[in-house]
Image: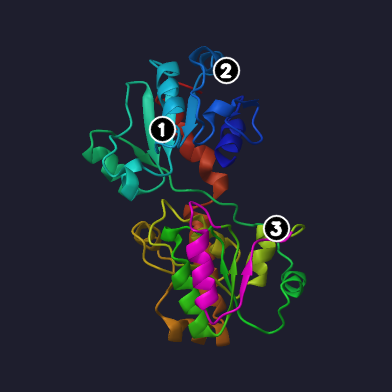
Amino acid sequence: MKWINAFRSLGHEVTTLAGDGDADVVMSELAIRSPNAPDLDKVTDALRDADLVVVENMISLPLNVGARDVLYRALDRRPALFHHHDLAWQRPEWINEPPPLDQPLWRHVTINNLSRQELLARGLDATTFYNAFELDPPHGRRNETRRQLRLTNERLLLLPTRAIPRKNVAGAIRLAEELDAVLWLLGPAEDGYGPELDGLLRASRVEVRRGLTEGFEIHDAYAASDLVVMPSTWEGFGNPVLESVTHHRPLAVFPYPVLEEIRAFGFRFFDLSDVDGINAFLNQPDVTLLEHNDSLARHYFNVADLPERLAPLLETWDIK
């Protein structure tokens, strides 16, 4: 949606095509793991009037190979921008997958420099566009949300992700135990991780809240929390890292590879293992740390700057 709004702010008409959800054109065969490939003529017709096609991650991971291959054919010798959130070989199950295809009128954009360098090593030039964020999100309802969670003065650690192995829920549980805090896991278990997650929760000594109750939003969850925890071992970017900043919450994080790129801008986050430092902050919060992080986000990750950042890329096709 952020890219869509950015293109519109540059004066371009935008039509969205997806396998499901709220799109202008919905073609179920484009959905993740659809058993049927889309019809080439239907895809070509849906894209017929487009001056530029922006492809969000569809060719980056082999989640729908049939749709990927049809899309390659539909975009043959046409301007296309491939926005890579992940790359196949960054997942153990696809480590031997080949890189995306390329043509003179195609451009590749990654959300981190690590992926850009990995594409370059495989013969593809790309440009890095870090994810952009709304710097003044709505104020959440701290007190009402905590009442709904049946909390009074307990410390609340927010894990704003789904539960799969690389999210390292066990790391968040350990930190909650060490801080004598309640853990709030927002997302569901996926990819068959449910039984393992259930075992972790049964064995833990902490109270755990699950999911976001109807009527409450992500902004409420951040407002209700005392600390955001991101124990992931791998993220293509890790949006909760910057969301913790924009919601003025301290962050405890495992040093997954791309985090070092984010930290290089000067952000101050706690390591997951720094229990004493986290305790000290929670006992006596340092507002200057939160303000420091906020100022960096405004300078480097402001969604309001996205149209200006995208404009030079469009000029490579002479699309004004």
Quadrant position of residue 10: top right
The disc, 1 or 2, on the residue closer to the chain's N-terminal end is 2
- Queried whether the magenta region covers residue 53, the answer comes back as no
Amino acid, disc 3: Glu
Number of disc labels? 3
* Label 1 with label 3: CB-CB less than 8 Å: no
**Left or right of 265 on screen, residue 207:** right
Tell me, for residue 107, which label it has, or none.
none
User: x%, y% of residue 264?
Assistant: 36, 61
The Cα–Cα distance between marks 1 and 2, rounded to whole angstroms, is 18 Å
Image: 262 above or below 114: below
Visible in this render: residue 292?
Answer: no
Q: Which mark is residue 46?
A: 2
Q: Identify which residue is drawn at 57% across, 77% down.
A: 287
Which residue is pictured at 36% across the width and 42% down the height? 87
Decide which of tag 3 and tag 2 comes sooner along the chain: 2
Circle number at residue 59: 1
> Which x, y percent locates residue 110?
39, 42
What residue is disc 3 on?
217
Sequence-wise first label, 1 or 3: 1
What segment is highlighted magenta in the picture?
Answer: 189-213
